[in-house]
Amino acid sequence: KRNITPVVSLNTLDIKEQGSFLVLVGSNPLWIKNALLNEKVKNLHPVILSSQPYRSLPGIYSYVTSDNKGSMNYLLNYFKNNNKSKPALYGVNSNSLPNIARKERFLGNSIFAVTEQDIFYNDGSIDQCFLSFEKQINKYDCVICVNDFAAIHLIKQLERKGIENIPIASYGGTLLSANFYPN
């Protein structure tokens, strides 16, 4: 006999169906925390899929995370091995767990000396993010984008301005990037 686990999409914290476990996928730390504290989750075993690199959320849960330290070091080493010396981190959304984790790894790396001033935020306006970056673009010789959306926007803005000499690496691999430059 096969056990079938129902899949429930949590657009709100109104959990109607209960099984033995609940998978929480989220990019907002406050939303995930509230989901873990929800009374209806009490008898479930939550499994969190997130890029948060540490256990800072309340309760008992399992989690699956990505290797943000390894991937950030890979990108920074790639730039270092290609004679780059001043990276920027572009497109950070302060409400996104993956972005927060990438920001922490960028700031905590031992390959380049970077500071908060080397981070450009997309907190509601990717256009403002570019305008902030554009004012300081001459300080940087490489850029790491936190996702495909930020990378594609940055590429389009740089092309529009005729700037072609700054290498860009991005966390991505989504349908967005495949559709932007299809094979």
Image (cartoon, rainbow, N blue to C red):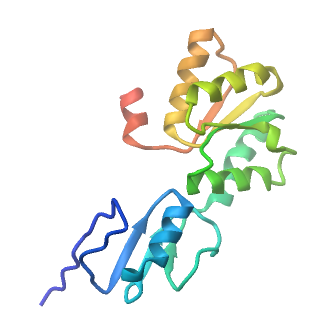
Residue 69 is left or right of residue 183, and the answer is right
Q: Residue at horizontal 80%, vertical 20%?
A: 138
Q: Residue at horizontal 38%, vertical 89%?
A: 43
Q: Residue at horizontal 53%, vertical 26%?
A: 153
Q: Quadrant of the N terminus?
A: bottom left
Q: Residue at horizontal 60%, vertical 64%?
A: 52
Q: Position of residue 175 (x, y in %)?
A: 37, 40
Residue 157 is left or right of residue 13, and the answer is right
Residue in front for this viewpoint, 32 or 84: 32
In this rendering, the answer to whether 163 lies above or below 58 is: above
Residue in front for this viewpoint, 83 or 139: 139
Looking at the image, which residue sits at the far right? Answer: 113
In this rendering, the answer to whether 99 lies above or below 157 is: below
In the rendered picture of this protein, how many numbered marks are placed on residues? 0
Q: Position of residue 109 (x, y in %)?
A: 79, 54
Residue 23 is left or right of residue 28, and the answer is left
In this rendering, the answer to whether 48 lies above or below 157 is: below
Looking at the image, which residue sits at the far left? Answer: 1
Q: Is residue 59 visible?
A: yes
Q: Position of residue 164 (x, y in %)?
A: 64, 16
